[in-house]
Amino acid sequence: MASSRTDGSRKTKAGDAVASRQKQLEASSQGPENLLTTNQGVVLPDNHNSLKAGLRGPSLLEDFILREKITHFDHERIPERVVHARGAAAHGYFELTRPLVEYTKADFLQEVGSRTPVFVRFSTVVGSRGSADTVRDVRGFAVKFYTREGNYDLVGNNIPVFFIQDAMKFPDLVHAIKAEPHNEMPQAASAHDTFWDFVSLMPESAHMLMWVMSDRALPRSYRMMEGFGVHTFRLVNARGVSHFVKFHWRPKLGKHGLAWDEAQKIAGKDPDFHRRDLWDAIERGDFPEWELGLQLIDEDRAGRLGFDLLDPTKLVPEEVVPITTVGRLVLNRNPDNFFAETEQVAFHPGHVVPGIDFTADPLLQGRLFSYTDTQLSRLGGANFHELPINRGVCPFHNFQRDGMHRMLINKGRVAYEPNTLGNGSEFRVDGGEQGFQSYPEALESPKIRRRSPSFDDHFSQATLFWNSQSAAEKEHIIAGYQFELSKVETPAIRQRVVDNLAHVDMRLARKVAEPLGIAVPDPKAAAGRSGFREAPATKALVESAPSLSMEGNGNTIQTRKVAILLAPGAELGAMKVIQQALLDAGATTKVVAAQLGPVSSSSGQQVPADHTFQNMPSVMFDAVLVPGGAAAAEALAKDGNAVHFVLEAYKHCKALCLIGESVQLLRLAGVVADDVPAPAGVVFGSNEPTARLQMAQDFIAAIAKHRHWTRALVEQVPA
Ligand code: HDD
């Protein structure tokens, strides 16, 4: 429990902040016990039978043991988050690698090497708590820093812009994108009429829609996605000088996405795909890591960006304002209890510390109200800051009192200030140096309920994003729109979407419209609609920003999962060399076979299978390795599940290494032939010892590329 001391201990250097935070949590933890008691501590005589009037008689109301157990059970659930209900979280630390004294007085951003404990929750936005992880959606990226000056929450997303510009529209946006209210369908999906009805009438959503239709909305892993603070915030130094700041989390493993067909299949095969991936990586000791990067912008530069920094539908390309790396985030401990930690953690963009401040972004301003308010119903009262996961590591003291589930026992008769009966006269409420000082931004304007004209250009940055994508990424965006709109039943809504798209890029709009059987998009139709405020497009400072693309990102195969398909008679020689090279490079391998138990190799060696083709299908892996051996290749070619495994990996553009005779698995689908060069990302080779090392190197290089989106004949392979 946080103490009520005001002894200034927040100033003393914590020896190891991370360890002491863990100790603090342990004080509220409980391991398994052998003895069962009631909540009052009375030892249970029996945990199987209720108290009855006779062996075969009715249960007695008197049975306080049964009543207590059932009552507690009846109240186990709390409301899920109104958005971001589905999530997974982990503990870790933030380490400063560059001092920020020049920019901010925030204590945790002063000293290189200082470590601040953190709790980070990733989430999808739309689905319910039990929905699948791999749906097309934005991902939340919320970081709670337990600093010595109080908790600081950076509550961001994996997409740097937002759908709307003003918090006034947030309930409408969420009502439109969530399952439709009459039948609660579809779950965790934006591909339905109400969402597209709404966004097609809100042209300010154009930029974010481009991101959501791209592979950014289908991350391969939480560990392989970026995070963004989205809004422009302020950093304020000890002299009171302010800089605007944009926050970026950049994953050490690179940023990577899934194929849409794959993401949909994973949603059925393993709805916990991202949660499991995060959990397993931490359990294995592969601690996920991100760099914290800042874009620091002074007032003068802010006025010359060509758009309004207060508009959350805009980003600052790093090609215009470079990103300075200032620290690293490492997640190294899984929660002990999902409910107590991941579910009860309460983030709030309004949890700031001295040296970090807000801007007048109207979306952020609304958020500053919403987050505490929502916890009041979700966590059942005003004392949620006392829950172990939400407690700060520094002392806190004030005269807020009572309320549901109050834990702290405040001593004394004084709960007001000023006072003379307690220690009221000691309090510094004189506006001195101490404490959080709001940046004294000058504000003198008439009250007005209108949008600033500086927010009117909705399309330039959507076009910038489009121009910055590779050819393959553009195809994925087109396919994303096509899929979503094919699920929209009202033709007029589809038409409105493509008319709006004509303002982003005419080719994109035409390509989306074509297979939907709708009219060639008409930009003028969009412009004539109410709610469509056409503004002269601002001149983008860059025509294209390569940093917005995910192509060619990352060059490591660390933590990638490679399936080794085994059948009786497999020749293990080359396979073993390649497997070792993969392990040395940090990948993990699993043997997958028709059934569990040992598989006999060509030399009679017994290799245990970890999984079967059905319980761990290809969508659970990043790459596939198939050993040679005529008998094994023959057996695999006759097994529909094995053939499907290889072809599906091919279709999802994953790296494949087929040794010796196993090449016939791809021949069956007609995607390789003698006179055709090997498709991109597919490595063939013989069992000969001389070929092995080269094969291993080629395979590693192919996996590092993540996906070979331009691979030939993919559409020929059945899904
Ligand atoms: Fe929000 C949760 C991120 C706009 C109101 N939001 C929530 C979470 C994240 C974000 C990551 C989950 C935190 C967790 O893991 O517990 N939200 C954003 C971002 C936004 C944004 C990056 C735009 C830039 N949000 C936004 C607006 C409002 C809200 C405009 C309301 C005016 N958000 C909420 C909320 C939630 C929430 C209703 C639901 C559960 C919670 O807060 O604790 O208050």
Image: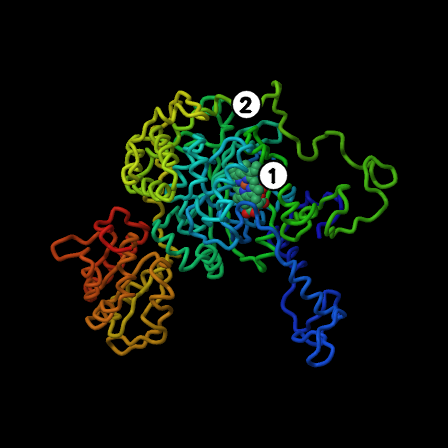
Q: Residues within 10 Å of mark 1 (few under 14, many from 20)?
A: some
Work out which quarter of the rendered image holds the C terminus and state it.
bottom left
The residue that disc 1 covers is 370
> In the structure shown, which secondary structural element does the residue marked by tag 2 occupy?
loop
Q: Left or right: where does residue 347 sit relative to residue 630? A: right
Q: Locate residue 706, reporting x and y percent.
A: 33, 51
Q: Locate residue 423, reporting x and y percent.
A: 83, 40
The residue that disc 2 covers is 450
Q: Residue at x 40, y 20 (%)?
A: 536
Q: Left or right: where does residue 438 sit relative to residue 94? A: right
Q: Residues within 10 Å of mark 2 (few under 14, many from 20)?
A: few
| Count of numbered marks | 2
How is the model colour-coded?
rainbow
Write down the quadrant of residue 670 in the picture.
bottom left
**Cβ atoms under marks 1 and 2 closer than 8 Å:** no
Q: Locate residue 64, reporting x and y percent.
A: 74, 68
Q: Locate residue 373, reporting x and y percent.
A: 64, 41
| Placement of 478 over or under 91, stated as above or below | above
User: Which numbered disc covers residue 530?
Assistant: none
Ligand 1 within 8 A of label 2's CB? no
Ligand 1 within 8 A of label 1's CB? yes
Report if residue 143 is visible in the image.
no
| Placement of 96 over or under 265, stated as above or below | above
> In the structure shown, which secondary structural element does the residue marked by tag 1 occupy?
helix
Q: Residue furthest bottom?
A: 55
| Image region (quadrant) for ligand 1 | top right
> Which amino acid, by three-letter code, is at mark 1?
Ser
Precedes in sequence: disc 1 or disc 2 = 1
Q: CA distance from mark 1 to mark 2?
A: 21 Å
Which is more toward the observer, 525 or 135? 525
| Placement of 573 over or under 92, stated as above or below | below
> Which amino acid, by three-letter code, is at mark 2?
Arg
